[in-house]
């Protein structure tokens, strides 16, 4: 068991967890048209952070990552001990490639640059495993502090909308021409967004000014199906959930709600429905937050975990914005309206290209 707290979110919806959650509660979406963007098509909605400060000599992503980390550390009462900073991303500062190959393109460069500006002595590590990166970072952080390798881990997730990622998803014909509709019968593709998120994982409760949740455990699995296509049987996601049950000693019956990946592509959402059905979770309240933020890639799992933590604190399970008429291969209980409920135990899942999948359980501290 480890404690998870001191969260911070920077997204188009706001510059704090509170701002993001309150705007999601009223159904506000970051997805909109950007007629003045240098490369985004004018007729497809995206979620882009436009209100931000950038220090001289720092890229947009570097600046946002530093700001988020500083905000998380500011919520701690004690920062002594052995620290690790895990940067979770799919592409990092990929836009730097336009200026040619250099060390500055590498995610390791960014995380080390951020670490040097923090008021603590901290090691660094990069997790880049497609769209499960953010959640995988939390699972690794839990393992590190539970085994005593580190006292505390600052988990940072960040990805921005870039020409590289836009052209990549466009080539797959995976983008919707409208705001995405996760798990909806008429879904026709995903929407891209951007976010930077941070949180602290530690086995020492006393360092936090406020702590409401703990990580019980998590696991990952790869279905080795296809570079971009999910398993038709949901095998990788199913196995990651089963491994999580085994690690935590819990079962589907003890889960109150599921925060799913839910990208709004036809194949992904069908795959998730099959995996949830196989895992005995089909009747549990399930949501996707992609309708609020778009797909934030390597930040997605961490962003949605932090938003779920706020849901647990507030006692409100967020709707799956954009989903009006659920329709997937297996019938699952997709929540289409904000639902007041006690959420004590929540399962968070993610899936990504290359067949990767991850699942983790967080629990509200009584």
Image (spheres, helix red, strand yellow):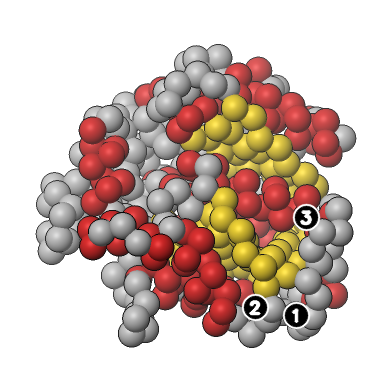
Discs 3, 2 touching: Cβ within 8 Å:
no
Please name whichever residue, 337 or 98, is drawn nearer the observer in this view of the structure: 98
Q: Which residue is painted at 12% across and 52% down in the image?
A: 42
Name the spot of residue 34 as percent of width and height, x first. Answer: 18, 59
Q: Which residue is painted at 63% across and 52% down in the image?
A: 137
Q: Earlier in the sequence, mark 3 or mark 2?
A: 2
Nearest to the eye among marks 1 and 3: give it: 3
Q: Earlier in the sequence, mark 2 or mark 1?
A: 2
Q: Is residue 91 visible?
A: yes
Secondary structure under the numbered disc 2 in the rendered image = helix
Please name whichever residue, 288 or 150, is drawn nearer the observer in this view of the structure: 150
Discs 2, 1 touching: Cβ within 8 Å:
yes
**Horizontal placement of 290 versus 142: left or right?**
left
Q: Which residue is painted at 70% across and 50% down in the image?
A: 140
Against 68, residue 108 (above or below) is above
Q: Cα distance, mark 2 to mark 1?
A: 8 Å
Instruction: Please identify the quadrant where the C terminus is shown.
Output: bottom right
Q: Cα distance, mark 3 to mark 2?
A: 19 Å
Q: Which residue is painted at 68% across and 24% down in the image?
A: 239
Secondary structure under the numbered disc 3 in the rendered image = helix
Badge 2, how many Cα within 10 Å: few under 14, some, many 20+? many
> According to the image, label 3 marks what residue?
144
Q: Which mark is residue 79?
A: 1
Secondary structure under the numbered disc 1 in the rendered image = loop
**Horizontal placement of 264 versus 257: left or right?**
left
> According to the image, label 2 marks what residue?
73
Nearest to the eye among marks 3 and 2: give it: 3
Name the spot of residue 192 as percent of width and height, x first. Answer: 33, 47
């Amino acid at each position: 068991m480890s404690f998870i707290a001191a969260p911070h979110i920077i997204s188009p919806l706001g510059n704090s967890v509170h701002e993001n959650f309150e705007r999601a509660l009223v159904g506000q979406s970051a997805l909109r048209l950007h007629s003045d963007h240098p490369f985004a098509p004018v007729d497809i909605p995206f979620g882009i952070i436009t209100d931000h400060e950038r220090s001289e000599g720092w890229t947009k992503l570097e600046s946002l990552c530093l700001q988020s980390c500083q905000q998380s550390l500011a919520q701690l009462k004690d920062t002594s001990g052995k620290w690790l900073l895990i940067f979770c991303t799919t592409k990092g500062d990929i836009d730097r490639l336009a200026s040619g190959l250099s060390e500055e393109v590498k995610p390791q460069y960014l995380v080390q640059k951020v670490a040097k500006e923090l008021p603590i002595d901290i090691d660094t590590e990069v997790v880049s495993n497609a769209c499960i990166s953010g959640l995988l970072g939390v699972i690794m952080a839990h393992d590190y502090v539970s085994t005593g390798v580190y006292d505390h881990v600052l988990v940072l997730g960040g990805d921005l909308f870039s020409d590289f990622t836009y052209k990549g998803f466009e080539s797959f014909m995976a983008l919707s021409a409208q705001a995405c509709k996760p798990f909806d019968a008429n879904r026709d593709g995903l929407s891209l967004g951007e976010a930077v998120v941070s949180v602290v994982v530690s086995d020492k409760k006393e360092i936090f000014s406020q702590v409401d949740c703990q990580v019980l455990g998590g696991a990952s699995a790869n279905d080795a199906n296809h570079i971009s296509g999910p398993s038709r049987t949901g095998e990788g996601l199913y196995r990651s959930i089963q491994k999580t049950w085994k690690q935590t000693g819990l079962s589907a019956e003890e889960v109150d709600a599921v925060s799913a990946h839910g990208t709004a592509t036809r194949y992904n959402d069908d795959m998730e429905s099959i995996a949830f059905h196989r895992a005995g979770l089909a009747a549990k309240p399930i949501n996707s937050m992609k309708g609020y933020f778009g797909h934030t890639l390597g930040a997605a799992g961490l962003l949605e975990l932090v938003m779920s933590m706020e849901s647990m604190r507030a006692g409100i399970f967020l709707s799956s914005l954009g989903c009006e008429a659920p329709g997937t291969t297996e019938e699952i209980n997709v929540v289409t309206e904000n639902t007041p409920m006690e959420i004590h135990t929540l399962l968070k899942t993610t899936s990504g290209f290359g067949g990767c999948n991850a699942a983790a359980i967080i629990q509200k501290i009584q």
